[in-house]
Image (spheres, grey):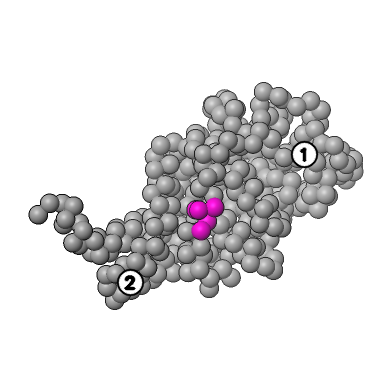
Amino acid sequence: MHLPKLLLLHWQLILFVLLSAATLIQLFYHLFFFSRLAFYKPALKSISQTHPVSVIICARDEAENLAINLPGALVQEYKTTHEVIVVNDNSYDDSKYVLEEFQRQFKQLQVRELTQEARMIPGKKFPLSIGIRAAKYEIVLLTDADCVPASEHWISSMQNAYHDDTEIVLGYGAYHKKKGFLNKLIRWETYHSALQYMSYALAGIPYMGVGRNLSYKKLVFARHKGFSAHNNVPGGDDDLFINAAATKNNTRINIDQESFTMSRPAENWAQWRRQKQRHYTTSRFYKPLHKFLLALYAFSQFVFYPLLIVSAIFYNWEYTLIVFGIKLLIQGIIFYKTLNKLGEKDLFGLFLFFDMWMFVYYLIFAPALIKKPKQSWK
């Protein structure tokens, strides 16, 4: 019998086989990658040592955010030498005067005023490079002007993640919990991204970090000549740099909840969509292995529920339900444990909805993968 006729005769079975394949792919990611974060316990250090730290924040027209959030970085309980550097990048608002007032109160605050844009280097990379070059200390800790440390031990916790061979520490940048469905979607997507990049790092395949909470040594920045490999790309000061510089030996994660930073979430759908589109315009520049792993996972998520529905209708709903139940059980265990670790446990009751929502999510944001990136970071 010819193959086309055979396929036509058994098309219902083929749908179920495809569903099973998508399920196996999903289970592979959950059991091989995500379980690492679910059952992660930080390695004990034989010798505890504190290091001098330079906190770096880049800001453009962020007077309001600086007034609200900067004190969180300035009042840290960290007895070892540290400094906070704010790079004020061509602001037109009152950022300069806000920073001058803080400087009168906090001697550890250093300000770098930029009054001329680097036209050939789009995005945030030029001011961030200025801040890193100005840093007095080897360990730099990065966050944004719209972020505030979740505790007064943020610096202490992030630097404590460094071991002798560590050059990069990936932190978690959470969003404030607020009322409304959009807030839950934003927090789920943020958690889901962290689930991936932290689990991949634990598997020895680090591929990104987030600039809201990221630390590395100046020597690794110098070794990779800063952002020179992707200076033409407006974004990527965090994920593209980590994609190039991180290895299985030099990278660690930090999920101590005192190490988290908190950001104000987008207030409407359009704002959130713009933020996510900016992120996805950089992912096309990841290493081939990273792109393949991320794409395969996303594709298996995207096709799972359409295949689930058609298999239940046209093949056998009982077998389909068994496959769905197995996937749901494994996911539930992984999501429960990782949501708790990242302080997002209130989202667990909605995880099935959010899993289905990812089909719509990919429809909305897939075009950003081929969209030309915006040249300005603000």
Q: Residue at x 86, y 40 (%)?
A: 93
Q: Which residues are magenta?
A: 360-364
Q: Residue at x 67, y 49 (%)?
A: 155
Q: Which mark is residue 313?
A: 2
* Dot 1 alpha-carbon crowd within 10 angstroms: few under 14, some 14 to 19, many 20 or more: some
Q: Residue at x 69, y 66 (%)?
A: 178
| Residue type indicated by callout 1 | Arg
Check disc 2 and report its element: helix, strand or loop: helix
* Res 149 seen here: no
Nearest the viewer among 354 and 259 is 354
| 28 left or right of 193 in image | left
Counting from the top left corner in percent of width and height, residue 232 is at: 59, 27
On screen, residue 96 above or below 39: above
* CA separation in Å, label 1 and label 2: 54 Å
* Dot 2 alpha-carbon crowd within 10 angstroms: few under 14, some 14 to 19, many 20 or more: few
Check disc 1 and report its element: helix, strand or loop: loop
- Quadrant the N terminus occupies: bottom left
- The mark that comes first in sequence, 1 or 2, is 1
Counting from the top left corner in percent of width and height, residue 228 is at: 58, 25
Residue with the most extreme bottom position:
318
